[in-house]
Image (spheres, helix red, strand yellow):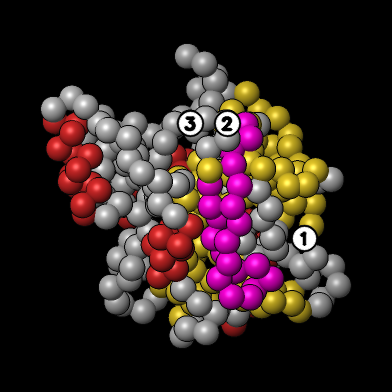
Amino acid sequence: MNAFLAASVTFWALIGHIPQVAALTLAEIGEEARPSTVHISYDATDPETGAVSVVNGSGFVVSSSGYVMTAYHVLEPWMAQPEAQRLQRSIMVRLGSIHNESLTAELVEYNASATVGGGADLAVLRIRRSATYATADFCYIENRPIGSRIFAFGFPAGQELNYAEGAIANPDGVGDRWTANINFDYGMSGGPVYDDLGRVIGVVKGGMKGVQPVRYITRLLRARSLLIDYGIDVERCDNPSPATSKSAQSSNSVIPTLNNSECNKIGFTDYSTFPPTFKTEVVCSEGKP
C-alpha cells in the first residue's frame, strides 16, 4: 500500500471511521505489480520418458532481501528429479520481465502436504544474489464477497508479463480456497492475485477440469506459517502497518491450524506444465471450533 493510502487509513481508523477508498485502475495495479512479479523457469526430466523440458511459472517478491512466494506445484517437477540433476539445473528467476537479467534462486520452504496447513501448495524461494528488491504490497483478508474484482499477474507460456481480470465466484471453496471466474493460463501458476486496491491477497493455484474459466486461488493467509520463519509477517489487510520481523512478533500471533479439519479430494489443472496437466489433491479445510 502506498504511503499516502496507508497514512489516510491509519488517520481515519484512529477516529473510528474508515471512509471508502477508491479502487485503482488496471494501469495503476499493473504498475504496482510489474517490479515484484517473478518469472520462474528451470529444466526438468520426465521420470517416465526421460525427455527434458523447460518448466515455467510465476511468483512475487515478499521481502526486499529476495524471498519469493510461489505455488509448490510449480517446483514439483524440479523436486521429483534426482539430487544430482537438481544440483545441475538451477531454478532461475527474472523480475518484472522475461528480458531482465536471469538470477539463480533456491527453494527454502514449501508446504505441499494435506496434513500440514491443509495442502497449501505454497513455496518460498530465495534469490541468491544479495541486493535490495522491490516487494509486492501483500496482506491477508479472511474473505471476499462474491463478485469482488481481482487481477492475476504472471508469465503465460513463459512469455512476457500479462494479466487476467475476473471476480470471486465462491469465497468458501473446497480446501479453504477461493474459486474465481477468471482465465489463468499456463505459466501463471504461483503468480500474485491482487484486489482492486493494489494489494496481493492470493496466489494462483490452478483450474477445474472441464470447467472454463473456473479457477482456484490460494488465500494469502495460508502463507503466514511459511514466511514468519524468515522474518516476514503477512498482516491483515485492514492493518496497513509494514511487515515486522519475527523478533517483533507477539507470542499470541495466530497461525492457521487444522483442528477439526475436513478433508476432500479435488481436481485441478496444473498450469506449470505444457500442455497443462490435470492432477488430484487431498485438501483440508479448517473445521469449526
Image location (x, y in percent) of residue 22? 36, 44
Image location (x, y in percent) of residue 234? 35, 45
Q: Which residues are magenta?
A: 150-170
Identify which amino acid the numbered label 1 is placed on.
Pro
- Look at mark 3 in the image and give the residue it sits on: 143
Residue 276 badge: 1
* In the image, residue 231 above or below residue 236: below
Sort mark 3 into few (<14), some (14-19) or many (20+) by Cα contacts within 10 Å. some
Q: Secondary structure at mark 1?
A: loop
Seen from the viewer's position, the closer of residues 103 and 201 is 201
Image location (x, y in percent) of residue 262? 63, 23
Marks 2 and 1 sit apart, C-alpha to C-alpha, by 27 Å
Q: Secondary structure at mark 2?
A: loop
Which residue is rendered at x = 31% and y = 77% of the image?
A: 130
Q: How many marks?
A: 3
Identify which amino acid the numbered label 2 is placed on.
Ile
Sort mark 2 into few (<14), some (14-19) or many (20+) by Cα contacts within 10 Å. some
Which residue is rendered at x = 19% and y = 31% of the image?
A: 13
Q: Considering only order in the chain, which callout, 1 or 2, is on the residue closer to the N terminus? A: 2
Q: Considering only order in the chain, which callout, 3 or 1, is on the residue closer to the N terminus? A: 3
